[in-house]
Amino acid sequence: MSTRDYTLPIEQTQWRTPTSGIVTFNWEYDEGRDKMLKLYEKGKNLQWNATDRIDWSLEIDHENPLKAPDMYNPLFGTTVWGKLSDEMKGT
């Protein structure tokens, strides 16, 4: 966000912290934003990127998204499992 939207001029809102050098925060984010976004995209491309790696057009079975067999459910074979309806079991 640029300081052009702030009420006070940047000269009045700077925050200087004395150290062995001077650290200045000036909240001028517009300058260099494009370079930062390009770096971010490059980093995502070198890592796992959900925008590119997931086929969002696939239909998902919300009851059993992993399509796992019933025997993988920890309740399978118990008396509780026997009392569940097929809808509650996700089958």
Image (cartoon, rainbow, N blue to C red):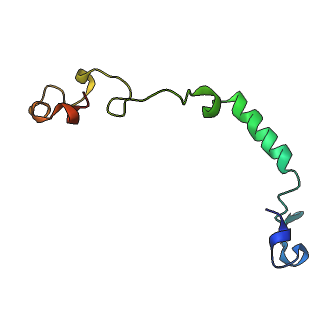
Q: Is residue 53 left or right of residue 39?
A: left
> Residue 54 or 18: which is nearer the viewer?
54
Image spot of residue 87 (x, y percent)? 22, 34
Image spot of residue 51 (x, y percent)? 63, 33
Please give the name of the residue rendered at 70% of the width and 34% of the height, measured from the top-left corner: 44
Q: Looking at the image, how many numbered discs can be counted on the residues?
A: 0
Q: Quadrant of the N terminus?
A: bottom right
Image spot of residue 41 (x, y percent)? 75, 37
Q: Is residue 19 visible?
A: no
Please give the name of the residue rendered at 60% of the width and 33% of the height, measured from the top-left corner: 50
Image spot of residue 46 (x, y percent)? 71, 28
Q: Is residue 30 visible?
A: yes
Please give the name of the residue rendered at 80% of the width and 39% of the height, measured from the top-left corner: 39
- Picture quadrant of residue 11: bottom right
Q: Is residue 77 left or right of residue 23?
A: left
> Residue 88 or 39: which is nearer the viewer?
88
Q: Is residue 66 left or right of residue 9?
A: left
- Picture quadrant of residue 30: bottom right
Q: Quadrant of the C terminus?
A: top left
Please give the name of the residue rendered at 26% of the width and 31% of the height, measured from the top-left corner: 90
- Picture quadrant of residue 37: top right
* 11 lies above or below 25: below
> Residue 50 or 78: which is nearer the viewer?
50
